[in-house]
Image (cartoon, rainbow, N blue to C red):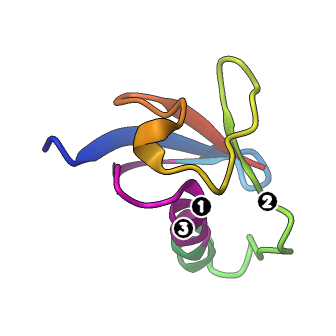
Amino acid sequence: MKNKLLVIVYVPLIEKQIDMYIPVVKKVGTIKNLIIKIIEEESEGTFIDDGSKNLYDKQTGEKIDNNQFVKESIIKNGSKLILY
C-alpha cells in the first residue's frame, strides 16, 4: 500500500480512537472531513462537527495544515493524530 498510510486518530471529546488508512494524494482538509464524518456516524450523535476542528500531531502538538497534501505533510505511516 504505497499510496496509503495507516494512522491512529484520537478524538478527546468523545474519548475514542480509530485506526484508518488515508490516501497520500489527498489534501489534509479532505481527510479531516472524512474522519469527521466517520466519527459522527460512529458516535451516534455524541460528536457533532462545529466547523472548527483541526488535526494535530499527537507527539508534537503541531497543527497540520489543511491545504497540504498528506504526502507533503508531517503525517507518516503510523502517525498518531488528534482531532480537536
Residue located beneath label 1 in the image: 32
Q: Secondary structure at mark 1?
A: helix
Residue 52, percent from left and from top: 86, 64
At x 54%, y 64%, the residue is 35
Under mark 3, the amino acid is Thr
Give the vertical position of 63 relative to 47 (above or below).
Answer: above
Mark 2 and mark 1: span between their CA atoms? Answer: 8 Å
Residue 69, percent from left and from top: 49, 51
Specify the quadrant that holds the N terminus: top left
User: In this rendering, would 78 be left or right of 30?
Assistant: left
Q: Nearer the viewer, mark 2 or mark 3?
A: 3
The span shown in magenta is 18-36
Image disc number at residue 63 = none
Image disc number at residue 30 = 3
Q: Nearer the viewer, mark 3 or mark 1?
A: 3
- Badge 1 density bin: few <14, some 14–19, many ≥20, Cα 10 Å: some
Verify CB contact (< 8 Å) between mark 3 and mark 1. yes
Mark 2 and mark 3: span between their CA atoms? Answer: 13 Å
Give the vertical position of 58 relative to 13 (above or below).
Answer: above
Point out the tag, 2 or 1, that comes first from the N-terminus.
Answer: 1
Give the vertical position of 65 relative to 75 (above or below).
Answer: below
At x 47%, y 29%, the residue is 79
Mark 3 and mark 1: span between their CA atoms? Answer: 5 Å
Verify CB contact (< 8 Å) between mark 2 and mark 1. yes
Residue located beneath label 2 in the image: 53
